[in-house]
Amino acid sequence: TISAGTLVNSHMIFLNSAETPVTHREVVWTFANPILGVMSDTGGNWEAASTLELGAPATNYPAVMFANRGMGGIDIDGYVVSGNQITVSMGVVQPGDWIRVVTVPEPATVCLLGLGSLSLILRRRRVCAHKKG
């Protein structure tokens, strides 16, 4: 569980094959920062439920979520997390396997967001002060 309000980065790992089964065994994904958690279950419900909060704003997600898009449909499906790496094995057919990996944000991202928030606060104070005078 990640506390509400925690700043995170979100990454989607997705593999699909429309016609013939495809397998990827022990593919290692390395992120810049530690992994906080992985959203994945057999039906894909956890990953789908996180789209509103963690999905990319410019991405066009399907209006109707695919059933059974989570991991667990084929015997090799699984992953192991270690620090900033996740080792993933997937065996897929349509609609594929979808998992969301949540990582600690880069310090530069946190600093930029902090500076942005500070500038909005200062701007608001300046506007409020201007209205009073």
Image: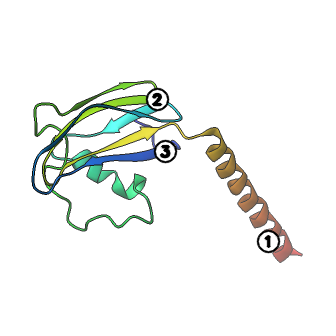
Instruction: Choose mark 2 or mark 1, whichever is in front.
Output: 2
Q: Residue at x 82, y 76 (%)?
A: 131
Is 90 situated left or right of 133 in this image? left
In the picture, which quadrant includes the C terminus? Answer: bottom right
Q: Secondary structure at mark 1?
A: helix
Q: Secondary structure at mark 2?
A: loop
Which of the pair 45/103 is nearer the observer? Answer: 103
Q: Amino acid at mark 1?
A: Val
Q: Which comes before the other along the chain, label 2 or label 1?
A: 2
Q: Amino acid at mark 2?
A: Asn
Residue marked by disc 1: 127
> Can you give x and y, in whole percent of width and height, for residue 46 in the image?
26, 45
Residue marked by disc 2: 84
> Can you give x and y, in whole percent of width and height, for residue 101 in the image?
38, 40
Q: Residue at x 21, y 47 (%)?
A: 44
Q: Which comes before the other along the chain, label 2 or label 3?
A: 3
Q: Secondary structure at mark 3?
A: strand
Q: Residue furthest right?
A: 133
Whole-angstrom CA distance, mark 2 to mark 1, is: 43 Å
Is 74 situated left or right of 47 in this image? left
> Does 73 appear above or below 117?
above
Disc 3 to disc 1: CB gap under 8 Å: no
